[in-house]
Amino acid sequence: MADQVSDPTNTTYDLETPDNLICPASEIFDQPAVRAALEAAASLGHSDKDIRTQTVEILNEARVAGRKRIAEAFAADPFPGRRGTRAYSWLTDQIIGEVLNIAQTYLHPLPNPTEAERIAIIAVGGYGRGEMAAHSDVDLLFLNPYKITPWAESLIESMLYILWDLKLKVGHASRTIKDCIRLGREDFTIRTSLVEYRYLAGDEDLAQSLATSLWEDLFKGTEAEFIEAKLEERAERHRKQGGQRYVVEPNVKEGKGGLRDLQSLFWIGKYVHGTQNAKELIAFGVYNEDEFQTFKTAEDFLWSVRCHMHIIADRAVDQLTFDMQVEVAEKLGYKDHDGRRAVEHFMQDYFRHATKVGEVTRIFLTSLEATHTKAEPMLLRLFKRRKKAKAPYAIEQNRLTVADEEAFLANPVNMLGIIEEVLRTGTLLHPDAMRMIAANLHLIDDSVRNDPAARKLFLGIMLKHGNPERGLRRMNELGLLAAFIPEFAPIVAMMQFNMYHHYTVDEHTIQCISHLSQIEREELIEELPIASGILQKGVNRKVLYVALLLHDIGKGQPEDHSVLGAKIARVVAPRLGLNKKECELVEWLIRNHLLLSDTAQKRDISEPRTVTGFAKAMKTVERLDLLTVLTVCDIRGVGPGTWNNWKAVLIRNLYAATRDALDNGLEDLNRETRETEAKRALRGALTDWKPKDLKAEVGRHYGPYWQGLPGSTHVIFANLLSGISDDSIAIDLMLDEDRDATRVCFAMVDHPGLFSRMTGALALVGANIVDARSYTSKDGYATAAFWIQDADGHPYEAARLPRLQQMIIKTLHGEVVARDALKDRDKIKKRERAFKVPTVITFDNAGSEIYTIIEVDTRDRPGLLYDLTRTLANNHVYIASAVIATFGEQIVDTFYVKDMVGLKYHNEAKRQALEAKLREAITLGAERAVT
């Protein structure tokens, strides 16, 4: 243990005095008054049971009043930080002290205790640190000198029953000093809890003996193994919580950059240096005064958030869920402004503090790791060939550091150079170098940003070393990325309050670049054949990486982020050294970075005008290739599970059709050509049919049927319609592996509202419809194909298909009325109700030759599609196809429709009337979903 330390066995914790809590201590717990009431009640008690009952009643009243007073203080001063946690801890201290007094004085009096009949009550864990929220656990150690005597057992039992009756969540252990030492050696969790011991009440000499034994017999000389255990524990905790600091529903306690990271710092600091609080670590050079203030500010913020969460939920809760985020933001006084919701401003502050916590703890822990963990065996070091560092850098224990600080800071471009050198040498960044960069970011000015050497280094970080994610993430966490590209600063830690994006904007950007480098390294050839092929063929990598880096840089403003991002790129791209043509291409990619995704997911790709319009927007194969790769990376970077086979097929089909149009001309994209090819394919597939029957089937359908469905589906419908009677319902359910969905094909006599009844039947079994086509044959039969997924976004398992088919048939026969049956199921979960999606309805008569396209962009819920299709049916709208795209809580339902006489909706008054009906259905359904 270090020499520079006061007596670490001193159990006096550096608590705020009672006068420095969130409110006056006497208003939280009036100790003299409570003591008097307890003793008066106890003296009148006729039995131990009476005494316990009265004690619980009096203390519960005091506890409820104390917590209410603390909550009021939180409402008046929402950011008290540690003063709030100390208040809860102090209230708990007083309650335990009074319980011990009653137990010792009235329930188990012992006038002449022996040496063995002594007891000390020690607070351990978070309670030992004096840090508590309203519903935190109360971890107690009942300490005995030798063995636990019958008197001690009875005393502890009585105390615990009273504490449990007070609804305190008590974690407890009854041990001797020898037990503590033995168990602490065996179990790091127990050892960690003992690091945070704090004497509460009872025999103080006994508590002091424990303190001395812990330091002399357990902690001393075991610093290295403790650090190693805590580092492993921290890594595992982060893995369980999602790995990234910017998971949008973070765990305030256990998540990356959360309170547990700060507590780990305290545990190790106390274990290694014998410190009693975080401030004392300054004296050991763990961090400087400015870094300590960063630590303290972040800790106060995180504790304030956690305390408000406990108050709001009235229970212990650490996951900052979406609905909780809205309430906490309101309690903390955040307001809507600059086009962003209060909750988004709050969460950006949260993630910025989490980043600071990560920075401080990383510097501390890596410096300890370097000085206390075991060195590599000499033989292993001899066989490892390491690259040597260039001046002014040096490698110490596989960490790159600065050999000459003066030379390093003389040229601020070196701050980029050291990141590039880390990637080149395959080393980690030394904590001293991290600290030096973070403390000197002010040196990155316009002269550095426009320095050709700096541009070259930055582009090298992205393009040269095969894994730019590592360098960019370290630059972002140190603030270097925002210093070099100031336009990037507003999106650092920016949260988008929706269920679609899993990460903050800056983390999403880095994830996208990581996916691009994976494709480049040919790790995803089987999963992403189109994107992999494009990169193998060769593209302008500089343009692609810069476009991905900047594609969301315009977010967080009232203006369309694609348009604003393109404007920003017009300034940033030349500064990064791109030539005029490259800058124009980057700007175009950012302005149109959603175009391919929106077209593929929100439009019917089988419609010739869809492909024609998209091909005209692309103009060149180079643009199509770059936008395709960017789109794939953008979707994959949203979060795990966002990319799936359904999206892959849509994008591949649009890419293939557009590439064909650009290579062979747009004139081949017409309905007649597609119809002829589809009929030829059907004849080839039905070679066993009689010529007369085959001719009847080919002549049975109108043009859109042939143009809008894949050939395999034409075969299914031909078999369903073969010999069908007017009163039968023919259904085929099949797994469509390519699309990651179940295909449901219906054939039956057509009648008004049939499409709506089909959507209702599917909604009743919990199916999510991702695509739908409906056509009426010349002899009056409806042929409808739906592609559906279960609630988890997967195809239905074969075992579930019979029930699915049974429910569909019942609904189509009218045995089950979807409108009534859906009422109880059409609900939005509580945690998802905070999301707001404005409803936007558009009519497009130019996007299709024969249909009006109605696009409904609104808040998703289970019965929405049924409500919309029923409204359209009730207003005599014929639905030919529906394309459904879901983005978290937002859904875009696109309908290709005609009026009752087969014409488009050209009349403005009719469109307005239909829009009003759709909005009314959405509003009524939304109200029903939250009641």
Image: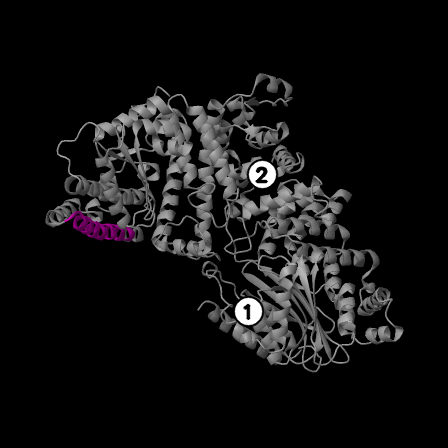
Of tags 2 and 1, the one toward the viewer is: 1
Crowd class of label 2 (few under 14; some 14 to 19; many from 20; radius 10 Å) = many
Residue 14 picture quarter: top left
- The three-letter amino acid code for the residue at tag 2 is Leu
Whether residue 731 appears in this view of the structure is yes
Pointer 2 with pointer 1, Cβ within 8 A: no
Quadrant housing the C terminus:
bottom left
Q: Secondary structure at mark 2?
A: helix
Q: Which residue is mark 1?
A: 863
- The three-letter amino acid code for the residue at tag 1 is Gly
Q: Which residue is mark 2?
A: 472
What's the CA distance linking mark 2 and mark 1?
A: 43 Å
Residue 688 picture quarter: bottom right
* Residue 703 left/right relative to 604: right
Crowd class of label 1 (few under 14; some 14 to 19; many from 20; radius 10 Å) = many
Quadrant housing the N terminus:
top left
User: Percent x, y for residue 439?
Assistant: 46, 32
User: Percent x, y for residue 653?
Assistant: 74, 58
User: Percent x, y for residue 352?
Assistant: 46, 44
* Residue 382 left/right relative to 211: right
- Based on the picture, tell me whether residue 63 belongs to the magenta stretch: yes
What residue is at 37 percent from the left and 38 percent from the top? 296
Compare residues 113 and 617 and report the one nearer the observer. Answer: 113
* Residue 904 left/right relative to 454: right
Mark 2 vs 1, N-terminal side: 2
Compare residues 703 and 904 and report the one nearer the observer. Answer: 703
Res. 266 mark: none
In magenta, the rendered stretch is 47-71
Q: Secondary structure at mark 1?
A: loop
Which is the main secondary structure of the residues drawn in magenta?
helix
User: Percent x, y for residue 845?
Assistant: 68, 72
Compare residues 289 and 369 and report the one nearer the observer. Answer: 369
